[in-house]
Image (cartoon, rainbow, N blue to C red):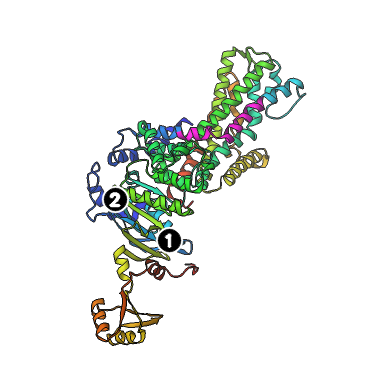
Amino acid sequence: MSTADTATVPAAGPADLAGAGAGTGTAARGPVPAWLRLFRSELRLIFGRLRNLALLAAVAALPVLIGIALRLAKPQGAGGPASSFIDQLAGNGVFLSLIALTIMLALVLPLTVAVVSGDSVAGEAGSGTLRNLLTVPAGRARLLSVKYAAIVIFALTACTVVVVASLAAGAALFPIGPVTLLSGNTVPLADGLVRVLFVTLYVAAALSALGAIGLAISTFTEHPIGAIAAILMIGLISEVADNIPQFAVVQPYLPTHWWLKFDSLLRSPIATGDLLHGLLSFGLYIVIFCSIAWARFSSTDVTA
Amino acid sequence: MSAATGGTEALVSSAAAAPVSVVPVDSDGLAVTTRELTKRFRRQLAVDGLGLAVPRGSVYGFLGPNGSGKTTTIRMLLGLIYPDHGHVALLGQPIPGAAVRVLPRVGSLVEGPAFYTYLSGRANLARIDAADRTADPGTARARIGAALDRVGLLSAAGKRYRAYSLGMKQRLAIAASLLKPRELIILDEPTNGLDPQGTREVRALIREIATDGVTVLVSSHLLAEVEQICTHVGVMRTGRLVFQGSLEELRSRGSLRIVVRTAQPEAAAKVLAGLGLADIQSADGEVSALLASQTPEQICRELVLADVGVAGLETPRPNLEDLFVGLTGEGFDVDG
């Protein structure tokens, strides 16, 4: 996701420099502080909005509920993607974070990212505020880069909230100590937490790829609800297709295929093959869909 | 954006020749120019070969019935919509090619106010100011306060936009265009939906802005709303400009009539007919006719010589509203 940030910021650079030279000369500031100012404004807008805060609150509450449920009744011989973590949970609360991420990646986390990314451009277009920003002028490249950077930050925040809430609930409900990895060897607690941090970043990168798809869809409509529904639908279709054996040929190319490969980080040595494949997939999705978003947004008539 | 500027090569190259750091001198003294501006939406030709010329320092009334293409034109002026053909220049710089450089000097209100309903008026203006890369964040608070004060919204600055009345929303939108000193202000239907009091306030505000030498382009579907403040007008009908010029030129296009108040209308009518005046109409104690080359003095003399008692004689200024309706057509004949 950091690659996307550094790739989009300089795109607004030359225009900014030209603007500073011929502008009214109110402030001799560089394009970077100006970009950061708009970025801060965008973050305030996203994190100041009650709807988004409610989403984050739900995202924080769910790991606690999962933790309580697993404390009360440990599922016997449970299948599913989270089962290997659930087996470990009774011995170590750290695993609640991995269980929560696995379960919530199915729907809840994609939903939060779909809401914010689907709303990003379509919401401004629908309310008419887009024309205000563009006539300021915010600059189309600059505005789009700010929008995407804010989506990435929101995705990272949602993942962090899940992990922090589950670590807190895990510590309260289960014992905490050295972490036994999926490969069988045990590492100190600090080492385990560092691995959880990397898992968080990996999942945030996965959701940033979905956010890029969301940003692109958002530039095609003035109706944020339609955009949000479309993004969610793409995520769900991808997950379903990923579980149908007949689609094995296309599965590596699906946006959600690599999402749960973060379990590689919990082996020793770390299986980097899957992780790198996953990061490559996310990176490609980000590049392709940010390009689509830019192609659409830079050429479209703003009639709303 | 570069693809869209392909059609404006001539303007781009002339602008590029000027040193970038100097405010470009516009030799024509025009704040807004468009040439052959054309935009088609699906099957509908919204704007058709438009050639606007808005002199610097003028208050330009951009008139036309609803749906005549005013808002589409304004959106093209501001780079929101890309034209199919033709060129736009604001303050001597091509749009959309130089939009990033020119638009900071242009304040605008397009198609009614649009803000975040869950933010206060002040927070909404802060959001707009944050998007402006040429705005100094150090002075933002003071500038936002001054803009709110100028439109009389300072006391409601902390209220959520959702709670604003229509008039307050409209004024907040005007405040947004006043966040920085501007050379050109484009206001699209700024009095739309306002009560007569609100309309008067907006008019006074525009007049005040214009006294600072700022060019104002204000669109309206009601001539009466802008007639008192405009120096120039452009009248649109079905995407075309049917009149453009000073208000005086518009008035002079009207046919001047002479009205004679007299106790002897028949005799007066005969004299007027003898002088070759056309379209003579007699009414109760009054005769009127279309004035051509004859002067009122000459007519008065002839009437007196013919022993017609003249109780009053006048050449009323042509009614602008009638001229306007004459140019744009009566209502309800929906264009398109």
Q: Is residue A24 above or below residue A184?
A: below
- Please report the residue visible at 57 percent of the width from the left and 28 percent of the height from the top: A159
User: What span is in magenta?
Assistant: A41-63
Where is residue A266? Give x, y as percent: 60, 21
Mark 2 or mark 1: whose residue is earlier in sequence: 2
Q: Nearer the viewer, residue A155 or A86?
A: A155
Q: Badge 2 sits on which subunit? A: B
Residue A89 percent location from the top left of the image? 69, 19
Q: Is residue B91 left or right of residue A181?
A: left
Q: Nearer the viewer, residue A277 or B43?
A: B43
In the image, residue B125 lies in the stretch drawn in magenta: no
> Residue A268 — which label?
none
Up/down of B77 relative to A107, above or below: below
Would you say B317 lies left or right of B72 here?
Answer: left
The answer to whether one can see residue A189 in this image is yes
In percent of the image, x 66 and y 22: which residue is there?
A96
Image height check: is B196 above or below B160? below
Which residue in the protein does label 1 denote?
A: B222
Quarter residue A75 falls in: top right
Q: Nearer the viewer, mark 2 or mark 1?
A: 1
Question: In the depicted view, which residue is nearer to us: B200 or A287?
Answer: B200
User: Which percent across, then down, holds residue A54?
Assistant: 61, 32
**Which secondary structure dominates the residues rendered in magenta?**
helix
Q: Answer whether labels 2 and 1 touch (C-beta < 8 Å).
A: no
Q: Which mark is residue B91?
A: 2
**Disc 1 marks which amino acid?**
Leu
Measuring from the top left, give residue B84's x and y in whole percent.
40, 59
Say which quarter of the image contains residue B312.
bottom left
Q: Is A60 within the magenta?
A: yes
